[in-house]
Amino acid sequence: MGHYSTLIIGKKELGWKYDIPSYLSFLFDEKDLYVEDNEDNGEYVGIGYKSTCKRALEKLDKLGFDWVMITEIYSFFYNQIKEEVYEDIYDELSEKFQNLSATALEKKVNVFFSKIPNFTREMELKDFANFFLPLMEAASGENSLKVLSIDGKIYRVEKDKHSFGIDNFLKDPAEFLYQKALILPPWIQIVAKLFDYELVSEYAEIISVVQIKLLLEATDADSIVDLKLEDMIEHEEEISDFHIESANRLIGKIQLYNKFFNSILNQEKVIKDVFFRKELLVSLNKIPLISNSAEKGRALEDLMETVFSSVEGLEVIEKRINTRDEEIDLQIKNSVAGTFWSSLGSPSFFVECKNWSAKVGAKEIRDFELKIRNHKKLVNVGFFISFNGFTREAKSALQRASREDYQIVLIDKDDLWILADSHKNTVYWLEKLILKPQ
C-alpha cells in the first residue's frame, strides 16, 4: 500500500503524498467514480475518478473558475511577480555585461521590457497555455520544441540537460527558467512565477486551481483526466463521499480563515493603504530611470491606474482608447459616495498622461479640452498628468478653460510625491487638487 494520489491530464502526471487535495473534486462529478477490482483476489487494481479535459473545464467554468476569474487572480499577483521577473532579467544581464554600471543595466532591462506588446492579462494567460506543455517537456529533459506566440514570433523552448521533472518544474519553475530570461517572452516568465513554491504554499488552493486550469487548456480536449486513488485507499467506501468531504474541508478552512482575520477586518483600509503607498513609492523612484519613451508612457498610465483604483468608488473602465479622432489614456467611472463627488456632475473622468522629458504646453491642454467637450454628457472633469510639469502657456490655457462648465485638473510628479509622503488618503488628495485654483 502506497501513499500517493495521482492526477493524470493527458500524458502528464501530478502527484501528492499523503493527501488527496480537496480542490481536485472540482474536476469531477460523482458519476465519474470508477472501480476496477482483480477478479482473482478481490483487491482493487484501479479506483478513482475519470473524465476528459473538455468536461473538467466545463465543470470548472460552472463553478466560476473561468477565464475571468483566473485573470483576476493573475492580475492580483501581477505587479509582485513582474517585479521578480524584472530582477531575474537584471541579474542575467549583469552576468552577461559585467562591466556595465547599475544605471546602464537598468536601462537595458527597461529596453527589454519595452518590447512587451500591449496584451491583456487574459491574453498572456492564454498564451502561456501554448507554452505550458513544451515547458514541462523541456524541464523533464524530453524535447526541444518551437512555440508560436501571440506576438507572432516563434520561440524555441530548449530541453534542459538536467531533468527537473514535471512535479519539480511546477513547484519551482524559477529554477528551470534561470538563465532563460532573455530567451522566453517576459509575460510567459511572469505567469510561470505564479507557481513558485512560496505563492503556492501561501495560496495553495487558489494557485493550484489556476495551474490545473491552464494545464487542462493546454491539453487536447478529448484527453483523459484520471484521478488515481488506489494507492491511497483500500475500500470503495473511503472515497464514496469524496465530494462531500472535500466540500467540508474547504468550508472548514473558510470558517477558520474568517475567525483568524476577523480581528483585522476593521484594519482593511489601513492595510490596503500601506500596500498602495509602497507601490506608489516604487513607481515614482523607477519612472525616472526609464529611457524608452513608449515604456515611460505606459509606466505613468499604470501608476495613475493604481492611484485612481485606490479610491473606493473609482473604477478604471477602459485604458488606451483609440478612435479615429482621439486617444484617451484612461476612463474612470465615478461612483464615489458623498455630495462633493456627485456635485461634480461627472459620471466619468478622462485621464491624460504625458511622461515627457519637457513640460507640457498649451496645445496639449487644448487638445485634452476638446476631448472633454466631445463627451460632455458623461465627462465634466478631466485629469491631466504631466510627470515633469506644465509651461506657463499651458496654465494660461487652463485658466481660460476654467470659465467653461467643465474642469481640468493638473497633476505633476510633485503632487504625486505629496500623496506618497502624506498620511491623508487618496480621496482627500484628489479633492484638494480639484478645489485648487489653477
Image (cartoon, helix red, strand yellow):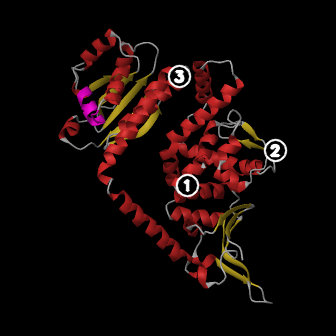
To which residue does mark 2 refer?
A: 161
Which mark is on residue 290? 3
Tag 2: amino acid:
Lys
CA distance for labels 3 and 2: 36 Å
CA distance for labels 2 and 1: 28 Å
Which dot, 3 or 1, sits closer to the camera? Answer: 1
Image quarter of residue 82:
top right
Frontmost residue, 142 versus 172:
172
Which mark is on residue 201? 1
Residue at position x 50%, y 24% in the image: 296
Q: Is residue 73 left or right of residue 91?
A: left
Residue 9 appears in view: yes
Q: Position of residue 107 (x, y in %)?
A: 59, 21
Q: Position of residue 191 (x, y in %)?
A: 60, 45
Q: Choose the circle earlier in sequence order: 2 or 1.
A: 2
> Where's the C terminus, which quadrant?
top left
Give the SS element for disc 3.
Answer: loop
